[in-house]
Amino acid sequence: MRAIEAPLVEARDLVKTFDTRKGLIAKWAVRRDYRVQALNGVSFGIARGETLGLIGESGCGKSTLARVLLGLQPLDSGRIVFDGEDVTAADGERLQRLRRRMQIIFQDPYASLNPRQTVEQIVGLPLRVHAAASRRQARDAVAAMLQRVGLKTAHLNRFPHQFSGGQRQRIGVARALILKPEFLVCDEPVSALDVSIQAQILNLLQELRREFRLTLLFIGHNLSVVGYVSERMAVMYLGEIVELGPTRDILRDPAHPYTRGLLAAVPRLDAGGAGAPGRQGARPRGDPASPLRPPPGCRFHPRCPHAMPVCATSAPAPITLDAGGDHVVACHLHSR
C-alpha cells in the first residue's frame, strides 16, 4: 500500500474474530471452527478530505471493519491510527473525545432511530452526551442541521414513524453531523432506499462532504453507487482486501478476478453486455465460503475461473501494479 501523506485514518493489519459458541457448547467446545474470522490483516489509509469506497458481498466483514475503526468493537490485533495518534486501545474519556471527531450513518433508517424519541431528541443526543451546548443552543443547532439536510423545523417534535425512509435517513445524517466530525463512516446508507431516493441522499452526502470538509469511508455492495462517490476503492472478500486503488483505474481495468466478476455482474442497458474493459471476465462461481472454514491459500480460489495450484496452498502477497504505488492487488496472477 502506498504511503499516504498525512492520512487522517490508518488501519494496520487489523484482525477480528468472533466466537459463535453459546451456552454449554461455549464452555466445553474447543474446536476452531466455532470462530469466525471477520477481518484478516486488513490495512489501508484514508487521506484527509478523501472518500474511500469499500465494496464487497454481504458477510465479507465491511460493517465489522467500520465498527472496529470507530471503537464500537475491540480488535484482536492490529493498530488504528487517527490523525497521527494510536487510538487502538482508546477508552473512557479519551474514547469519548475521539468520538466527537468520528461518526457513523447506519444502513437501516428504520432500526437506527429510537421510535420513542422525537427528532429533536434524536439529533440532539450527541450534543447532550458530549455536553457540547446548552438546551437552547442545542435546539437551535438541531433546527439548523435539519434544514441543512432538507427537512423542516416543524419536524422537530415528530417521531420516526411519521417519516418516509428517505426522510429518516436524512435524520440519521443530521445526527451524525451535529457535532461537526472530521471522519464519517457511511455503512451502506442508501441500500434500504428506493433508487430515486438513493440519488438524493448521495448528492446530499457529496454536498455535505465539501461543506464540512469530511473524510469518508463509504461502504456498499453496489459498484455503481460506490464508484460515484469515491476517489479510491477497496475491494473486500472474506475479511481481506484483495484490491485497492483509484476508483477510475479499478472500474476501467480491474486486476483481481473477484473485482472483474463484480463488474461483470452489474446490469447493463445495452444488449451486448461485453466489450467494456472493466466488464470482461466471468462471474464468480458458486457462493462465498463459510467464514467459519475459510479456504486455505487464496480465499477466492474455489470460485476463481483462473485458479492455479499455488492458489490453493499459498496466500498471495499484495503487489503494486503502477509506478506510483496507487493500485495494489493480492493475486497470484500478477506474481508470475
Image (cartoon, helix red, strand yellow):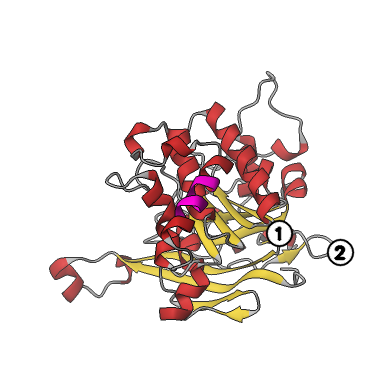
Query: Are dots 1 and 2 in contact, CB under 8 Å?
Result: no
- Residue for point 49% across, 65% down: 296
Q: Is 1 displayed left or right of 192 in the figure?
A: right
Give amino acid for label 1.
Gly
The image position of residue 314, as x and y in percent, is 58, 68
Q: Could one spot residue 188 in this view of the protein? A: no
Q: Tell me if residue 273 comes above or below residue 313 in the rendering.
A: above
Based on the picture, tell me whether residue 295 belongs to the magenta stretch: no
Tell me if residue 64 comes above or below residue 250 in the rendering. Answer: below
Q: In this view, does 8 lie to the left or right of 112?
A: right
Which residue corresponds to mark 1? 49
Q: Name the residue under label 2.
A: 323
> Which element carries disc 2, helix, strand or loop?
loop
Instruction: Please provide the residue range marked out in magenta.
Output: 138-144
Front residue of 5/55: it is 5
Count of marks placed on residues: 2
With respect to residue 156, does 178 lie above or below? below
Mark 2 neighbour class, 10 Å CA radius: few under 14, some 14 to 19, many 20 or more: few
Can you see residue 333?
yes
The residue located at (39%, 55%) in the rendering is 290
Quadrant location, the C terminus: bottom right
Q: In which quarter of the image is the N terminus?
A: bottom right
Among the two numbered marks 1 and 2 on one chain, the one whose residue lies closer to the N terminus: 1
In this view of the protein, which residue sits in the foreground, 2 or 238? 2
Residue at 45 percent of width and 56 percent of height: 136
The amino acid pointed to by label 2 is Ala
